[in-house]
Image (tube, rainbow, N blue to C red):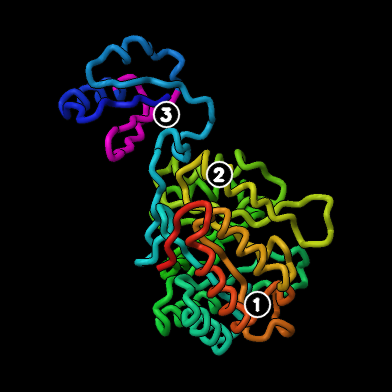
Amino acid sequence: MIILLKENANPKQVENLTKFLKNKGFDLHMSQGTEHTIIGLIGDTSTVDIDLISSLDVVEAVRRIQEPYKNANRKFHAADTVVDVAGAKIGGGHFMMIAGPCSVENRDQIIGVAESVKASGANVLRGGAFKPRTSPYAFQGLHEEGLRLLSEAKKVTGLPIITELMDINHLPLFGDVDIIQVGARNMQNFELLKELGQIRKPVLLKRGMANTLQELLMSAEYIMAGGNENVILCERGIRTFETATRNTLDLSAVAVLRKQTHLPIVVDPSHATGINEYVPPMALAAAAAGADGLIIEVHNDPPHALCDGKQSLTPEQFDSLAKAVRAILPFAAKELVWE
């Protein structure tokens, strides 16, 4: 349920109302807009007397919300959320470009790629230290050494870093990481999500390969219910019967999520297509659709990459893509600025 307060509502009356609602056992989500304030009630609202609340001088309207996610719901929070990542912003008209290799392999590789993607305009560096792989015999990442090399690349370039957390026991190692990525396989690892709700570090939550958008939003709700509102959603393709690409990129997710939630939306065309020549057109389509950001895999030597070289762009290819994205943003479905 949401309560829309009148414009220029009396602060004392608002305070009395919030105290009354809290005494009734509700958790409140306050959203301050340019003209109105919205109070979101979280809890069992079946016993709320709507007529009583509506009759208060300070209340403009009361509406019941049917969606099971409250914190992530745009009806509770009309304005777009802006997530600040060490000065790089995403959401609310701010476009973010995340780029880097699938896996951190060695010092020269990660620092070289970091320098090149920064020169092309990327404002966040990606790189896997812990890698979930289908085969137990595939390269699993450098683990702590990978995190150390990411931190070194951050110091050299000044780029914030994002990497995937697979096990909550590894969280103490992520002190220098600016965005924690939750991969598709862990989207419904609810114990992990609840733990991430206890921190205030930004979390990029990837959609599971067979999950609905409501399930994605419910996973975001787990994080936000713990108090961490710095959540970024990521569409990375879903599994369908089509085999021409690694997954099927669901670009309609951008439009649907834009209506349903205030959280920033990133698209990952690298994992979605699995083939580097398809990454640029899908990246441009995502930008045109109004995505708040892109996450692109870039490797200095894709044929010899230890992980996902087939879907990685070279630094030169990424530079061309970055220029094309900048050119298309003014014509996107949503006004976006890449800073």
Horizontal side, residue 22 vs residue 146: left or right: left
Above or below 104: residue 94: above
Q: Residue at x 49, y 41 (%)?
A: 261
What's the distance in space between the residues labelled 1 and 3, CA to CA?
A: 44 Å
Q: Residue 284: x, y in percent? A: 60, 64
Q: Which residue is mark 1?
A: 313
What's the distance in space between the residues labelled 2 and 1, CA to CA?
A: 28 Å
Asked if marks 2 and 1 touch (Cβ < 8 Å), the reply is: no
Horizontal side, residue 67 vs residue 28: left or right: right
Q: What's the magenta region? A: 23-43
Query: In this orientation, which residue lies closer to the viewer: 74 or 190?
Result: 74
Q: Residue at x 42, y 29 (%)?
A: 42
Residue 25 on the magenta segment: yes
What's the distance in space between the residues labelled 3 and 2, CA to CA?
A: 21 Å
Q: Residue at x 47, y 68 (%)?
A: 173
Pick whichever of labels 2 and 1 is earlier in the sequence.
Answer: 2
Residue 243 on the magenta segment: no
Asked if marks 1 and 3 touch (Cβ < 8 Å), the reply is: no
Above or below 213: residue 118: below
Does residue 142 appear anywhere in the picture? no
Above or below 131: residue 35: above
Does residue 145 appear anywhere in the picture? yes
Q: Residue 328: x, y in percent? A: 54, 64
Q: Which residue is mark 3?
A: 42
Mark 3: few/some/many CA within 10 Å (<14, 14-19, 20+): some
The amino acid pointed to by label 2 is: Leu
